[in-house]
Amino acid sequence: MARKQGSHAEITGPKVRQAALRLFARHGFAAVSMRQIAAEVGVQAGALYLYTPDKQTLLFDLMRDHMEELLSDWQVPEGCARAALEGFTRHHIRFHLARPELVFIAYMELRNLEPRNFAVIEGLRKAYEDQLESILKRGVSTGRFAVPDTKLATLAIIAMLTGVTTWYREGGRLDRGAVEGIYWDMVRKAVAVE
């Protein structure tokens, strides 16, 4: 299917994605229709198909772009595992707090992906998890970290860090910098050699 091109498409295409993002995060993928997305954008429902083949593609594109941006925004540094782990912790929190709707969709809507799309997202998630696990393995190999199972620790740390988006509110008791520092302290203590 040929996608619409030109200045109108460059404006409307991102509006379609933003509308889908807001509606999926607010109501859930299954509850949102293409007609609702069109109404949010201010176009006829049929016009959406100039920008996307279907709702599944919108969901997949949002999730894939989120994971690709996360991966490209963070690269595992060489050297000290402790500094790399701190960098990962702070980056993960910072990145995710800036995108709470995408984070919600990325975790809650996996079940609505078709198998082929699910496999792509799972591959991207595994690539990201592998970066953290490589840091933990490096720390274990140098005697800096005491982690009996690096895979389990990876999943636990990512779940803890991502969970910040469920409770953090701008203007609350703690600012983002304080949250990063506290979470880094918890991660550091969880893996440190006693």
Image (cartoon, helix red, strand yellow):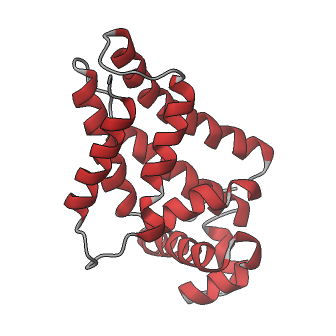
Q: Nearer the viewer, residue 157 or 189?
A: 189
Q: Is residue 50 visible?
A: yes
Q: Nearer the viewer, residue 119 or 175?
A: 175
Q: Is residue 182 above or below residue 137?
A: below
Q: Nearer the viewer, residue 113 or 95?
A: 95
Q: Residue 126 at x, y = what percent?
A: 57, 33
Q: Is residue 116 left or right of residue 122?
A: right
Q: Is residue 80 left or right of residue 19?
A: left
Total marks shown come to 0
Location of the N terminus (image quadrant): bottom right
Q: Residue 27 at x, y = what percent?
A: 66, 79
Q: Quadrant of residue 57?
A: bottom right
Q: Is residue 77 above or below residue 12?
A: above
Residue at (62% x, 89% y) in the render: 39
Q: Residue furthest front?
A: 194
Q: Residue 7 at x, y = what percent?
A: 41, 71
Residue at (56% x, 90% y) in the render: 42
Q: Is residue 142 above or below residue 113?
A: above
Residue at (54% x, 84% y) in the render: 41
Q: Is residue 189 above or below residue 148?
A: below
Q: Residue 144 at x, y = what percent?
A: 29, 18
Location of the C terminus (image quadrant): top left
Q: Quadrant of residue 155?
A: top right
Q: Quadrant of residue 31?
A: bottom right
